[in-house]
Image (cartoon, rainbow, N blue to C red):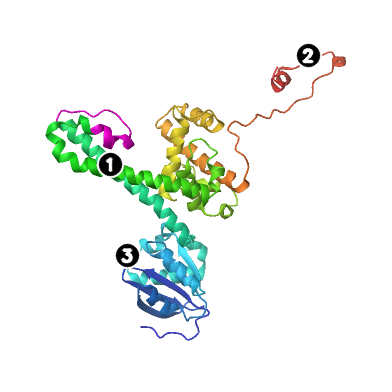
C-alpha cells in the first residue's frame, strides 16, 4: 500500500463500488498517488473511513450502490461526483481492467476535469422509495403478462382459443374457456393471475392518492390527454426539479428520445434513438404517445402533428412518429410543469395581417393578402 498523505484537503478520491468491498485510490493536487485501499461496503465501513476526513472530492460510478453511498458521503461533508457509466469508455476499453485500476481512473479524471465524467444527480431517499412503488407495479404487470401468454399458449396447443379480453378481466373470464384437460394444470397459474390483478389494482389506488395529495404538481401534467396519474408521477419523480433544465427541449435528449449521431465529413447516417435516459419513464411516454395517435386519442395539435409525420410513409414511419410524439410530449410536460400554465390542446393560429391596398390606389386585394385575412 502507498503511504497515506496527512494532508487530505487537496485529495481527489476514486471509489470503485462492489457488493462486498469498495476500492479506494487517492491522488493529490500534483497527480501523485497517495493511497490505495480496500474497505467494507457497509455504512459503518464508509463512515469509519471518510467520516473524519477533511472535505475532498470523491468520484464514483453510478450503479446499484451509488445512490445510498453518495448520500452518505455528502452527509460526511465531501464533494461527491457520480459518473455516468456511458461516458467512461476510458475504463471499459482498458485491456487491464480491474477494481484498483477503475478507482484510479475515476480519481485522475475527476482531478483533471469532473465534466468528463458527465455527472448525474441521484434522487433523494424519499423520492427513490416512492419510485420503487411504481417500479414494483411494473414488475407485477410484466409477470401477469407472461402468465397470461403462458395460459393462452397452453390452451392453443390443446386446440382451444381464449377470447380477446383485457388483462384485468383475464383472471375471471378466461377460466371458463380453458380446455378441460388443462384446468388442473393451469388452476394455480390462474389463481396467481387473479392475485396479481388485485395487487396491481391496489398499487394503482396508491398512485392515484399520492398524485392527488403528495404530488399536486402532477395536475399540470395530467391536463394532456393520455397522461394519467402513473405517467405524471413517474415523470415528476424522475425529473424531480424542472429547474434542472434551462430549456424544455433538452428533456427529450435526457430521456434518450433523440437520435444518435455519427456525423463525420459528408456522412451523417440516420440512427436509432440513444435510449440513454430512464427506460421506465421512456416506456410510459411511448405508451402515452400510442394512445395520442391511436383511434381513441382526442383531436389536438400533438396528435395532428404526429399523424402528419406518420403519413409521410417510408420504413417504420408509424414507429418513428410514436417516438417523435413521445419526445415532444416529454418537452410539453416539462414546459407545463415549469410554467404552471394551462394546457391548450389546440392553440389558435396567429396570422400576420398584411396592409390592405386602399381604394384610391385603384388596385385589387392580392392573393397573399386574401389568404392572410382568411377570406
Query: In this rendering, is residue 53 above or below 305?
Result: below
Q: Which residues are magenta?
A: 158-174
Q: Which mark is residue 364?
A: 2
- State the SS at label 1: helix
CA distance for labels 1 and 2: 74 Å
Question: Which residue position holds label 1?
Answer: 194
Foreground pick, 91 / 209: 209
Within-10-Å neighbours for mark 3: few <14, some 14–19, many 20+? few
Please give left or right for residue 243 compared with residue 34 in the image: right
CA distance for labels 3 and 1: 51 Å
CA distance for labels 3 and 2: 78 Å
Q: Which mark is residue 95?
A: 3
Q: Earlier in the sequence, mark 3 or mark 2?
A: 3
Q: Position of residue 95 (x, y in %)?
A: 32, 65
Please give left or right for residue 7 compared with residue 153 in the image: right
x 51%, y 35%: residue = 225
Query: In this rendering, is residue 46 above or below 272?
Result: below
Within-10-Å neighbours for mark 1: few <14, some 14–19, many 20+? some
Amino acid at each position: 500500500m502507498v503511504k497515506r498523505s496527512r494532508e487530505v484537503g487537496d485529495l481527489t478520491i476514486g471509489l470503485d463500488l462492489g457488493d462486498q468491498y469498495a476500492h479506494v485510490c487517492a491522488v493529490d493536487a500534483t497527480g501523485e498517488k497517495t493511497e490505495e485501499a480496500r474497505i467494507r461496503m457497509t455504512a459503518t465501513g464508509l463512515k469509519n473511513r471518510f467520516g473524519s476526513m477533511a472535505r475532498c472530492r470523491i468520484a464514483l460510478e453510478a450503479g446499484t450502490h451509488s445512490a445510498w453511498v453518495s448520500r452518505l458521503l455528502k452527509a460526511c461533508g465531501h464533494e461527491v461526483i457520480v459518473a455516468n457509466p456511458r461516458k467512461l469508455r476510458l475504463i471499459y476499453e482498458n485491456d487491464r481492467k480491474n477494481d484498483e485500476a477503475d478507482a484510479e481512473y475515476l480519481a485522475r479524471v475527476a482531478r483533471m476535469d469532473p465534466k468528463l465524467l458527465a455527472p448525474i444527480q441521484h434522487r433523494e431517499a424519499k423520492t427513490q422509495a416512492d419510485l420503487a412503488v411504481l417500479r414494483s407495479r411494473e414488475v407485477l404487470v410484466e409477470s401477469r403478462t407472461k402468465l397470461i401468454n403462458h395460459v393462452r399458449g397452453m390452451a392453443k396447443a390443446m386446440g382451444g382459443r381464449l377470447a380477446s379480453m383485457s388483462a384485468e378481466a383475464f383472471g375471471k373470464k378466461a377460466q371458463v374457456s380453458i380446455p378441460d384437460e388443462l384446468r388442473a394444470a393451469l388452476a394455480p397459474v390462474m389463481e396467481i393471475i387473479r392475485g396479481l390483478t388485485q395487487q396491481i389494482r391496489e398499487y394503482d389506488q396508491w398512485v392515484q392518492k399520492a398524485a392527488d395529495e403528495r404530488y399536486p404538481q402532477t395536475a399540470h401534467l395530467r391536463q394532456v390527454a393520455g397522461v394519467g396519474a402513473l405517467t405524471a408521477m413517474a415523470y415528476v419523480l424522475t425529473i424531480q426539479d424542472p429547474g434542472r433544465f434551462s430549456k424544455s427541449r433538452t428533456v427529450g435528449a435526457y430521456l434518450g428520445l433523440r437520435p444518435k449521431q455519427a456525423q463525420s465529413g459528408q456522412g451523417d447516417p440516420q440512427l436509432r434513438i440513444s435510449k440513454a435516459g430512464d427506460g421506465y419513464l421512456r416506456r410510459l411516454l411511448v405508451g402515452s404517445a400510442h394512445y395520442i395517435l391511436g383511434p381513441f386519442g382526442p383531436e389536438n395539435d400533438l396528435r395532428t402533428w404526429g399523424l402528419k409525420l406518420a403519413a409521410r410513409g417510408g420504413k417504420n414511419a408509424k414507429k418513428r412518429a410514436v417516438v417523435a410524439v413521445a419526445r415532444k410530449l416529454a418537452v410539453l410536460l416539462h414546459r407545463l410543469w415549469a410554467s404552471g400554465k394551462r394546457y391548450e390542446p389546440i392553440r389558435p393560429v396567429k396570422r400576420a395581417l398584411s396592409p390592405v391596398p386602399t381604394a384610391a390606389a385603384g388596385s385589387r386585394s392580392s392573393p397573399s393578402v386574401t389568404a392572410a385575412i382568411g377570406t
